[in-house]
Amino acid sequence: MGAPLTTRGNAPKQDRSRATRRRLLQSAVACLAERGWTGSTVAVVAEHAGVTRGAAQHHFPTREDLFTAAVEYVAEERSAVVRDLPRPAGVREAVEAVVGLYTGELFRAALQLWVAASNEPQLAPRVVALEARIGRETHRMAVRLLDADESAPGVRETVQGLLDMARGLGLANLLTDDGARRERVVAQWAAVVEAALRG
Amino acid sequence: MGAPLTTRGNAPKQDRSRATRRRLLQSAVACLAERGWTGSTVAVVAEHAGVTRGAAQHHFPTREDLFTAAVEYVAEERSAVVRDLPRPAGVREAVEAVVGLYTGELFRAALQLWVAASNEPQLAPRVVALEARIGRETHRMAVRLLDADESAPGVRETVQGLLDMARGLGLANLLTDDGARRERVVAQWAAVVEAALRG
């Protein structure tokens, strides 16, 4: 109990600042997923988060700062959630969990950011670095979910290809609900991946 | 030799009109791949194609007309090329060819159009219809390249999953050259797909 005397006065202010920052990051991902890069300005995100534009710019001086930080923050939050889940019972459940990483709001937001970066030189290097960090973490999550032994030949590439498939399934779900087809593909590929991993 | 008398006067004009139309479609795909949806106006495409804006609007009254027609035209051109290729010697070559469908300018252009459609209500229904047509044709190409027998259980879903993986590999190649990693994934997955298809 009781913060040290010297910080007692600042603690609530810091808490409020952290809460504002978190709201801005979550709003930025929601706006990006729903309205795309062109429709997601700092002003739009500030309004969505219920904070002033000045407060948003205090936390994130540029638009690039805000959106790259937002995708990273939400990806880290998700990693923490996945880390705390019990390991799936079988390969089918593991493949479903891996594919599930690419069908929600975070994937839609990241996709908008990646595609915008392909046409915006000032955004590209930051998104490339972010993609590498998220890619490594997603690979670790998949290895853990699948209980895969990467010291065996080909297993690393099997996991990578599965993640590429999951990314493609996410893209196929962008404009229409692809859930029924996806379920059949996942059922078949879970069997294929199990044979490949367990020999 | 010799067109019928009644069309003789119109034939060169029709040829010119067709050539202009083709140049506009090819330029539209190039601009979309390089500059994205926001950077690709009808004026930008007309300049790239070396025709007047008026001529572009004569062929394609709206921006949506131009870009959906362009992606469809280039996809059809590509289908014709793939149909005339000799069937690949083995599954590895077939998987390489399938993945190759997603790593060029056409995929980049289509990706820009798909993602723009996710935020633009007037574009979405046309892109959904286009995606369905191109998806069916790409599936037919993959079945032919792989010499797959879709009457066997699971084969249809195996081919679909491979196309999803190819789409994901295309996305992974958007911001950086992913060629070295892709080659390793393709080598491993060619073996996995061969085992799944040939049982």
Image (cartoon, coloured by chain):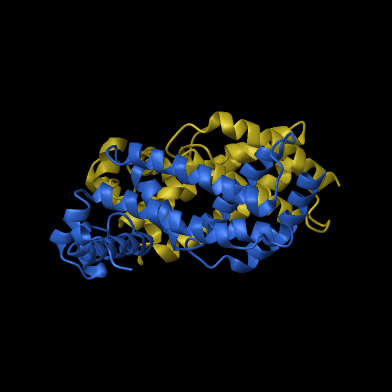
Chain colours: A blue, B yellow
Q: Write down the quadrant of residue B195 in the picture.
A: top right
Q: Write down the quadrant of residue A35 in the picture.
A: bottom left
Quarter of the image with the N terminus of chain A is bottom left
Q: Residue furthest left?
A: A54
Q: Say whether residue A120 is visible.
A: yes
Observer-nearest residue: A74 or B113?
Answer: A74
Q: How many marks?
A: 0
Left or right for A23, reference B26: left
Observer-nearest residue: A86 or A192?
Answer: A86
Residue A8: percent from the left, percent from the top?
A: 21, 64
Q: Residue furthest bottom?
A: A50
Residue A68: percent from the left, percent from the top?
A: 33, 49
* Residue at 66% from the left image edge and 48% from the top image edge: B162
Q: Residue furthest top?
A: B180
Q: Say whether residue B11 is visible.
A: no
* Residue at 36% from the left image edge and 60% from the top image edge: A29
Observer-nearest residue: B80 or B67?
Answer: B67
Residue A56: percent from the left, percent from the top?
A: 19, 59
* Residue at 62% from the left image edge and 42% from the top image edge: A160
Quarter of the image with the C terminus of chain A is top right
